[in-house]
């Protein structure tokens, strides 16, 4: 476990986050698996990481809560003593609604978790990885969405807007820390077959939308993980401020 780089994955207990944790372990990372509520799921991912020879811990924390975010990074400091990568994956969708039906409470929750939480997590990571703060460099990968480009009309325009904010944040932060050893990039997944659709009230969305995708199928969490690990890796050493569509052509 010693000598391995350390990766924190928010929302690492399921879906894309869990796939990233598993692949990271196979590629030589130690992994901090953040989860909001499902400790059993996070523990299962931790066990998979350890089976691949990596060190791993599960860290409970709501990325919509600033105190939880601070505590999450402090836990990484205590356990691993370093941080080399962050995947800003945790996020939410809500039930399909028109914009003129959305409540203030819904909008505030969406932006607090998907936007403010991701920015605060990146801020904590920069404080640990940037040469300006005595760090040795690192990589941040933000998980955006093709919704940022397509708008998700009559489904969840608020979610699309939150991911468009992540795109802009990715570009701005990447330029801010480009001379400090920190690379910042993003992935825009398309329709990916994970349980996030069920949490938004559309459990069959991936299957139902397959015919509208140029490749005629939804993607998998593992396909997103492949792209994430590429951007985290030294192979992508000259890539920063990039937003990669992993969407089957959608």
Image: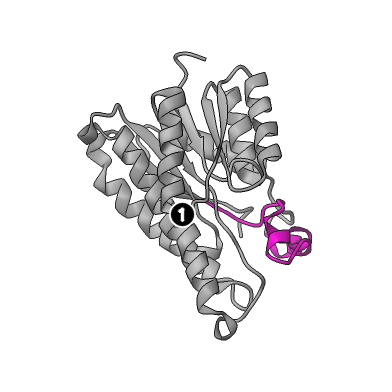
Which percent across, then down, holds residue 144? 50, 55
Residue 185 in sight in this render:
no
Task: Specify the farthest residue to the top.
Answer: 2
Of the pair 166 and 42, the residue shown nearer to us: 42
| Residue position marked by numbered label 1 in the rendering | 65
Task: Specify the farthest residue to the bottom.
Answer: 100
Image quarter of residue 86: top left
Indicate the quadrant containing the C terminus: top left, top right, bottom left or bottom right: bottom right
Which SS class for mark 1?
Answer: loop
Which percent across, then down, holds residue 67? 42, 49
Image quarter of residue 116: bottom left
Which percent across, then down, holds residue 9? 52, 39
Q: Is residue 9 above or below residue 30?
A: below
The magenta stretch spans which residues? 188-213
Describe residue 111's horizontal placement relative to residue 217 as left or right.
left
Of the pair 29 and 112, the residue shown nearer to us: 112
Q: Is residue 15 above or below residue 157?
A: above
Which percent across, then down, holds residue 126? 32, 40
């Amino acid at each position: 476990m010693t000598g391995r780089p350390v990766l924190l994955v928010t929302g690492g207990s399921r879906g894309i986050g869990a796939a990233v944790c598993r692949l990271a372990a196979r590629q030589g990372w130690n992994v901090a698996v953040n989860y909001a509520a499902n400790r059993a799921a996070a523990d299962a991912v931790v066990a998979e990481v350890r089976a691949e020879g990596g060190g791993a811990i599960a860290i409970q924390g709501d990325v919509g809560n600033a105190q939880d975010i601070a505590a999450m990074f402090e836990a990484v400091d205590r356990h691993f003593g370093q941080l080399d990568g962050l995947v800003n994956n945790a996020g939410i969708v809500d039930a399909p609604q028109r914009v003129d039906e959305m409540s203030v409470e819904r909008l505030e929750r969406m932006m607090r978790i998907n936007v403010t939480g991701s920015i605060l997590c990146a801020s904590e990571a920069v404080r640990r990885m940037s040469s300006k703060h005595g760090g040795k460099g690192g990589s941040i990968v933000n998980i955006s969405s093709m919704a940022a480009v397509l708008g998700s009309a009559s489904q969840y325009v608020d979610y699309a807007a939150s991911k468009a904010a992540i795109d802009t944040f990715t570009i701005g932060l990447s330029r801010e820390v480009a001379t400090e050893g920190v690379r910042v990039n993003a992935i825009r997944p398309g329709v990916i077959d994970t349980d996030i659709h069920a949490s938004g009230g559309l459990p069959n969305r991936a299957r139902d939308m397959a015919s509208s995708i140029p490749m005629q199928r939804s993607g998998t969490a593992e396909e997103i993980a492949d792209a994430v690990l590429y951007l985290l890796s030294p192979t992508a050493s000259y890539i920063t401020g990039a937003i990669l569509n992993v969407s089957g052509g959608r």
